[in-house]
């Protein structure tokens, strides 16, 4: 789709020019005496239980794990930082000491409205607004890192983001795959906002076979309203358009699409949310088998599998509690979810508890140690 490549290239070029100008000026003009050494430590526990027996959109299972992300960072000129550390995952009940370990290492630039990241960094540094059609709860638990680059801009009334995430290495064991993300939006009037999110995924080959490439695009423009009337309300109306092609099959592009209406009402941390999707199957290749003999499934699609419903209508209702404490250093989330499609109801329970600290170990300006 050339039009999206043009839009992506123009946005990325504009943001890159602005960022390079900011980085150059702050590096040249900034004071090298402003140097800090800091530690960041996060521990989070995740519980995700799905009861999807009989569903053609997902499987039953339980995720129960603890994650640790300890990092050390060096900051100079108040804007430039280098952060190194690790992301460590332990599945409860596993006999292994660690079930997964990944390196965290990246350069970070922050100055006013502009930010940039390059390396392997935490996904929560992204500021875009992405529907669950892009990323499911389980994807965010097991894939919390971005490997690549991100550039963003954020003001009081608008934001923009461009990111490249290299998700798979070209090897005998894994497919080469990467994703380009674009998200932008802004407020208009007192209560309304609008924006668009876009994902372009290139799902390529293993080194042991060729000609099994899948192109997977997802576009999501939306408009919304946020206001307070005793409760805090957040209402979102969006359109989801998928553009997908399996080059192994000579069947051309598939264009699944549909509308999505999201509603959230909250007070004192207690919330009720409802997301309704009406449209086509956004995951038409989910059960297709590639030349390696493996189904594409969630290796290709990272969104909630219920967006692949063949029944044209999918509704998600959540009732829960979500709140932060101790100056946002501790956060708690608990949610009971009803997934409805094809005239049946399926259940999901989510619990998440996280704690994060970020003390300054050394500050050259005043030699403080916390």
Image: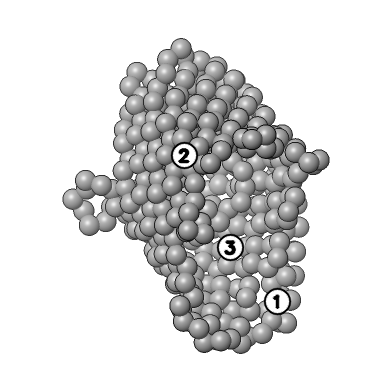
- Whole-percent x and y of residue 255? 62, 26
Horizontal relation, residue 161 to residue 93: left or right? right
Rendered-image quadrant of the N terminus: top right
Is 159 rendered above or below residue 264?
below
Instruction: Please say if the residues under marks 3 and 1 sit with CB atoms less than 8 Å apart.
Output: no
Q: Position of residue 355 (x, y in %)?
A: 41, 57
Residue, disc 3: 117
Q: Residue at x 69, y 37 (%)?
A: 227
- Residue 192 picture quarter: top right
Coordinates of residue 37 in the picture (x, y in percent): 49, 78
Q: Residue furthest right?
A: 189
- Front of the two marks 1 and 2: 2
| Residue sitting at the far left | 95
- The mark found on residue 321 in the picture is 2
Mark carried by residue 26? 1
Secondary element under disc 2, as helix, strand or loop, is strand
Q: Earlier in the sequence, mark 1 or mark 2?
A: 1
Measured in 3D between alpha carbons, the distance from the residue under mark 1 to the one under mark 2, in whole angstroms, is 42 Å
Instruction: Give the percent coordinates (x, y) of residue 363.
Output: 53, 82
Query: In this view, which residue lies farthest toward the front?
Result: 230
On-image quarter of the C terminus? bottom left
Q: CA distance from mark 3 to mark 1?
A: 16 Å
């Amino acid at each position: 789709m050339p039009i999206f490549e043009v839009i992506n290239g123009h946005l990325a070029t504009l943001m890159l020019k602005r960022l390079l100008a900011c980085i150059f000026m702050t590096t040249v003009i900034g004071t090298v005496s402003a140097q800090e050494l800091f530690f960041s430590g996060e521990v989070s526990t995740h519980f995700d239980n799905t009861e999807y027996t009989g569903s053609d959109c997902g499987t039953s299972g339980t995720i129960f794990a603890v994650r640790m992300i300890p990092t050390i960072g060096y900051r100079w000129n108040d804007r430039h930082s280098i952060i190194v550390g690790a992301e460590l995952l332990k599945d409860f009940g596993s006999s292994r000491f660690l079930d997964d370990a990944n390196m965290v290492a990246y350069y970070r630039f922050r100055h006013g409205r502009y930010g940039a990241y390059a390396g392997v960094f935490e996904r929560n540094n992204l500021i875009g607004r992405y529907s669950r059609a892009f990323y499911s709860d389980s994807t965010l638990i097991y894939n919390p890192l971005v490997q690549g680059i991100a550039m963003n801009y954020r003001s009081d009334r608008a934001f923009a983001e461009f990111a490249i995430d290299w998700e798979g290495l070209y090897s005998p064991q894994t497919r080469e795959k990467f994703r380009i993300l674009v998200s932008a939006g802004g407020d208009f009037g007192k209560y309304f906002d609008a924006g668009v999110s876009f994902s372009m995924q290139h799902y390529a080959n293993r080194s042991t076979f060729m000609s099994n490439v899948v192109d997977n695009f997802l576009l999501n423009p939306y408009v919304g309203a946020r206001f307070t009337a005793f409760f805090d309300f957040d209402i979102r109306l969006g359109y989801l358009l998928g553009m997908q092609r399996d080059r192994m099959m000579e069947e051309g592009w598939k264009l699944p699409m549909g509308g999505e209406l999201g509603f959230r009402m909250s007070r004192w941390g207690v919330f009720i949310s409802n997301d309704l999707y009406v449209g086509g199957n956004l995951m038409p290749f989910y059960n297709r088998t590639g030349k390696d003999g493996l189904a594409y499934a969630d290796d290709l699609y990272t969104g909630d599998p219920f967006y692949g419903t063949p029944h044209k209508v999918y509704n998600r209702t959540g009732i829960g509690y979500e709140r932060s404490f101790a100056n946002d250093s501790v956060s708690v989330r608990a949610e009971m979810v009803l997934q409805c499609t094809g005239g049946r109801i399926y259940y999901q329970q989510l619990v998440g508890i996280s704690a994060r600290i970020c003390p300054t170990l050394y500050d050259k300006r005043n030699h403080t140690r916390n």
